């Protein structure tokens, strides 16, 4: 009886390995779109802001000159205390993935403010600072 269970387990494991190998072999890689301009990053950031129904009055954007050729846009977003900054970061990351861009986040304690940096070609192109404002009411999501 024990040998029958072991044999069945080995057969199922072999079958799943073969199936996995076939799926990996036949699966197409995901289509990657390249960014044609940095304005696309701004568009994707604004899309995420709109998805979370953050009023434009709570969003400030400023440009910081990094060097003679490069300017970085920094978004400061004021949100209520119960706003899910992690969900925002995840959604923004998902929006950027098809464009080979990524995000890196850093939480500042004790206020749990979140700094998100949008990285493309190993360079930070945009920054999004999500700042807790205790005077704001809950945003309905």
Image (cartoon, rainbow, N blue to C red):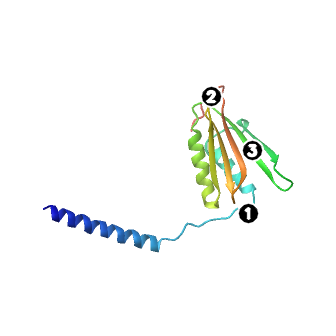
Whether residue 45 sits left or right of residue 20 in the image: it is right
Residue in the picture at 84% in, 52% down:
67
Earlier in the chain: of badge 3 and badge 1, it is: 1
Of the two numbered discs 3 and 1 in the rendering, the one whose residue sits closer to the viewer: 3
Q: Dot 2 corresponds to which residue? A: 137
Q: Position of residue 77 (x, y in %)?
A: 69, 38
Residue 126 horizontal side relative to residue 15, left or right: right
Outermost residue toward the right?
68
The Cα–Cα distance between marks 2 and 1, rounded to whole angstroms, is 38 Å
Above or below residue 78? Residue 116 is below
Which one is in front, 141 or 9? 9
Looking at the picture, tell me which residue is in the foreground, 103 or 47.
103
Q: Position of residue 87 (x, y in %)?
A: 56, 43
Q: Secondary structure at mark 3?
A: strand
- Residue 13 picture location, percent across and down: 30, 66
- Disc 1 secondary structure class: loop
Label 3 to label 1: alpha-carbon separation:
20 Å
Mark identifier at residue 36: 1
* x and y, in percent, of residue 5 in the image: 19, 62
Q: Is residue 71 left or right of residue 40?
A: right
Q: Nearer the viewer, residue 78 or 56?
A: 78
The mark total stands at 3
């Amino acid at each position: 009886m024990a040998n029958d269970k072991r044999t069945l387990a080995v057969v199922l494991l072999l079958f799943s390995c073969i199936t996995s190998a076939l799926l990996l072999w036949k699966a197409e890689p995901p289509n990657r779109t390249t960014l044609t301009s940095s304005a696309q990053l701004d568009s994707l950031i604004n899309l995420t802001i709109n998805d979370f129904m953050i009023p434009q009055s709570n969003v400030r954007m400023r440009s910081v000159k990094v060097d003679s050729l490069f300017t970085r846009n920094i978004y400061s977003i004021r949100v209520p205390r119960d706003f899910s900054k992690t969900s925002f970061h995840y959604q923004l990351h998902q929006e950027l993935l098809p464009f080979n861009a990524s995000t890196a986040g850093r939480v500042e304690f004790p206020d749990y403010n979140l700094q998100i940096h949008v990285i493309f070609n190993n360079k930070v192109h945009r920054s999004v600072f999500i700042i807790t404002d205790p005077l704001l009411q809950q945003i309905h999501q």
